[in-house]
Amino acid sequence: MRDIRGDLEERANIVHDQIRAAFGHYENVVQQLQRERDERVSDLKHTMVMIERLMQFESNIVGKPRASAGIAFSSCR
């Protein structure tokens, strides 16, 4: 019977290298997704600030809406 330990060790090393490569790829994908998420959240926050500023501007120019107009508006939602 021949000794196959060397072959098994070589195969284990190959599989180990494949696992490390897959993990490295996974880490890169996760980092890319986190960067994309952070960019999207930042864009949305800037949009929200702009909307709040426009609402404040409109409120200053037009004045506060009357209570009846506010009730009609809220019932449309």
Image (cartoon, rainbow, N blue to C red):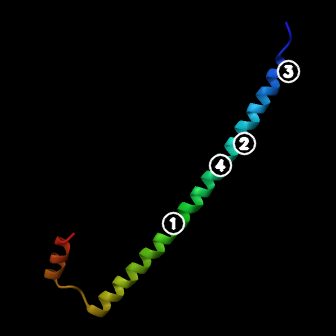
Which badge, 4 or 2, is on the more N-terminal residue? 2
* Location of residue 36 with respect to 25 vertically, above or below: below
Circle number at residue 40: 1
| x, y percent for residue 31 | 62, 55
Residues at marks 3 and 2, CA–CA distance in whole angstroms: 23 Å
> Looking at the image, is 61 positioned above or below residue 9?
below
Q: Is residue 51 above or below residue 7?
A: below
The quarter of the displayed image where residue 38 is located: bottom right
Residue at horizontal 32 percent and vertical 88 percent from the top? 58
Quarter of the figure that contains the C terminus: bottom left
Amino acid type for the residue under numbered disc 3: Gly
* 3D distance between C-alphas at marks 4 and 2: 10 Å
* Occupied quadrant, residue 34: bottom right
**Which residue in the structure is indicated by mark 2?**
21
Give the mark nearest the N terminus, 4 or 3: 3
| Labelled pair 4, 2 in contact (Cβ < 8 Å) | no
